[in-house]
Amino acid sequence: MISIQELTFQGMELMAAPYLTFEVWICVTLLNFLQTYSYSCLAGKLGLRLRRPYQYRGNPARVVIGKGVKC
């Protein structure tokens, strides 16, 4: 896990040397999106799992799966 501040700082360090402004910021944006989206999907799946009622051994039909993030 890397913070947005650290990712931005590293992007500015890379941008200073070769003067590739747009390429660096596009990469920083994509990395930030991928990190945020993956954590969002994991949180959605965890939320689904925590919303499920406890399963009873004799009656598996009582398990209700709620709606959530589809990843």
Image: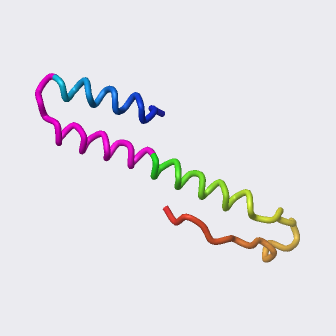
Asked if residue 32 is among those painted magenta in the image, a careful observer would answer yes
Total tally of numbered discs in the picture:
0
- In the picture as drawn, the residue positioned furthest to the bottom comes out as 61
Q: In the image, is residue 63 above or below residue 12? A: below
Q: Estimate the x, y position of residue 62 in percent, counting from the top left.
A: 81, 75
Q: In this view, does 66 lie to the left or right of 57?
A: left
Q: Residue at x 17, y 42 (%)?
A: 22
Q: Residue at x 33, y 27 (%)?
A: 9
Q: Residue at x 38, y 49 (%)?
A: 33
Q: In the image, is residue 40 above or below residue 17? A: below
Query: Bounds of the magenta span?
Result: 17-35
Q: Which residue is drawn at 49% across and 61% down?
A: 71
Q: Is residue 41 left or right of residue 50?
A: left
Q: In the image, is residue 49 above or below residue 61? A: above
Q: Is residue 51 left or right of residue 17?
A: right
Q: In this view, does 53 lie to the left or right of 1?
A: right
| Colour option used | rainbow
Residue in front for this viewpoint, 36 or 22? 22
Asked if residue 29 is among those painted magenta in the image, a careful observer would answer yes
Q: In which quarter of the image is residue 64?
A: bottom right
By secondary structure, the bulk of the magenta-drawn segment is best described as helix
Q: Estimate the x, y position of residue 8 in percent, counting from the top left.
A: 34, 32
Residue in front for this viewpoint, 25 or 67? 25
Q: Estimate the x, y position of residue 42 in percent, counting from the top left.
A: 56, 51
